[in-house]
Image (spheres, rainbow, N blue to C red):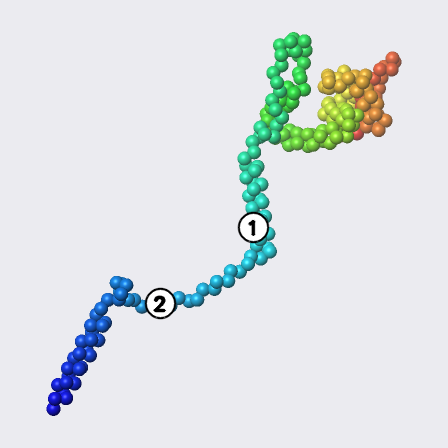
Amino acid sequence: MRAAPHMAMDDDDVATTVMTRFALPPQSGTRPSLAHSEPPRDSVVDTPSAWSRAHAALGAALRSVRERFRKARLADRLPPLPPPRSMTATRVSVGAVAHDERGEQLLLDIMRAARPYQDAAVYVANYAAVLRKLGDDAYAEGLLHFALSRMRPDAEGFVSIARLRDRLPELSYSGTLVSALTRLEAAGIVALTGTTEGGTTRVLLRVPL
């Protein structure tokens, strides 16, 4: 008869113990929460292919080239400015133009020129650079050939030597001009006519440049 009350007390003690155990907070002081499982991650990284590495290297090279040309100034690609001419040199050579000053005027004239002449200046500059590499004789012949090709002949198709010398005053008549014209005549590019004294007076261009 006394066993029943004893069993009831045991049930109350068990219930009290269970409730007390769940009411206590965790030792860390935080509320427990459900842990969400995450999908496993692949720790192995795929190595880039040879094509992707080459593509990345090419892109870096192109960016480097664009950056270098973007920062370059036009003045960095031009020759330095010529030094100022002294008053003595100006008085001695009245009306003469030094080669460096002529070059500066040339650059300015190209900037002022119409678009067709600006495009043509690129080809003429390349042609002259090749002639420079071939030597003085080839350069003189090419210079005369070009000058004659850009001069209007008279009614008979000739260009006078006087006009040619005015166009190319830097060429020595007896030392450079006549010798170059003689070689051009031997090559069949020009025909020369002269006076009774044997001096050449006119040039006929047979093969335009």
Q: Are marks 1 and 2 in contact (CB under 8 Å)?
A: no
Residue occupying image coordinates x 59% and y 26%: 111
Within 10 Å of disc 2 (Cα), the crowding (few <14, some 14-19, many 20+) is few
Classify residue 5 as left or right of residue 161: left
Mark identifier at residue 36: 2
Give the image quarter of residue 100: top right
Q: Is residue 30 above or below residue 159?
A: below
Three-letter amino acid code at the position of disc 1: Ala
Q: Residue at x 68, y 11 (%)?
A: 93
Total numbered labels? 2
Q: Which residue: 54% across, 36% down? A: 70
Q: Could you say which disc has been placed on residue 56 in the image? A: 1
Residue 143 position in % (x across, y down): 75, 25
Location of residue 76 in the rendering, given as x and y in whole percent from the top left corner? 59, 29
- State the separation of the CA atoms marked 1 and 2: 40 Å
In front: label 1 or label 2: 2
The secondary structure type at the circle numbered 1 is helix
Q: Looking at the rendering, which quadrant does residue 62 occupy?
A: top right
Going from N to C along the chain, the mark reached first, 1 or 2, is 2
Give, as a three-letter code, the residue at label 2.
His
The residue lying toward the viewer, choosing from 157 and 34, is 34
Name the quarter where the C terminus is drawn: top right
Q: Is residue 91 above or below residue 13?
A: above
Q: Residue at x 34, y 67 (%)?
A: 35
Q: Quadrant of residue 134?
A: top right
Q: Nearer the viewer, residue 29 or 127?
A: 29
